[in-house]
Image: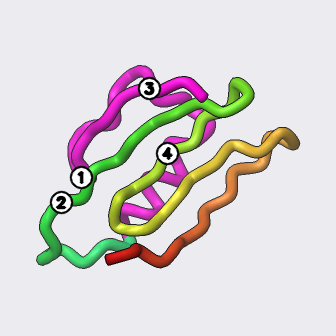
Amino acid sequence: MQLGTRWRAGDEVPASVPAAIRGGIAEVESRLPADDPASMWTLTFLEGRPIAELDAGYEVILEASGDVTISSFELED
């Protein structure tokens, strides 16, 4: 796994974020409540493919097939 970068949701997506997952990131951000404090994205690479994880409980993943998947997960206390 290779760590990429971090940025706040709602801010400009860094240039290092691959174009293939930018649409998925925008879709997730459109689901976030406007009055929530801004969450942080973390970009990592697993087997050379980007994964953007939002600490509010979402992942945007570029699959080996080239498809982009968006999934949500439960946050642990």
**With respect to residue 76, does 50 lie above or below?**
above
Going from the N terminus, do you reach mark 4 or mark 1 first? 1
Going from the N terminus, do you reach mark 1 or mark 2 first? 1
Q: Secondary structure at mark 3?
A: strand
Going from the N terminus, do you reach mark 3 or mark 4 first? 3
Q: Secondary structure at mark 4?
A: strand
Tell me residue 69's x, y (percent): 68, 58
Q: Estimate the spatial distance between the alpha carbons at disc 4 and disc 1, rounded to whole Å.
A: 14 Å
Q: Which residue is mark 2?
A: 38
Going from the N terminus, do you reach mark 2 or mark 3 first? 3
Magenta span contains residue 14: yes
Q: Which mark is residue 4?
A: 3
Q: Nearer the viewer, mark 3 or mark 1?
A: 3
Q: Which mark is residue 10?
A: 1
Q: Which residue is painted at 51% across and 34% down in the image?
A: 44
Q: Magenta stretch: give its range.
A: 1-30
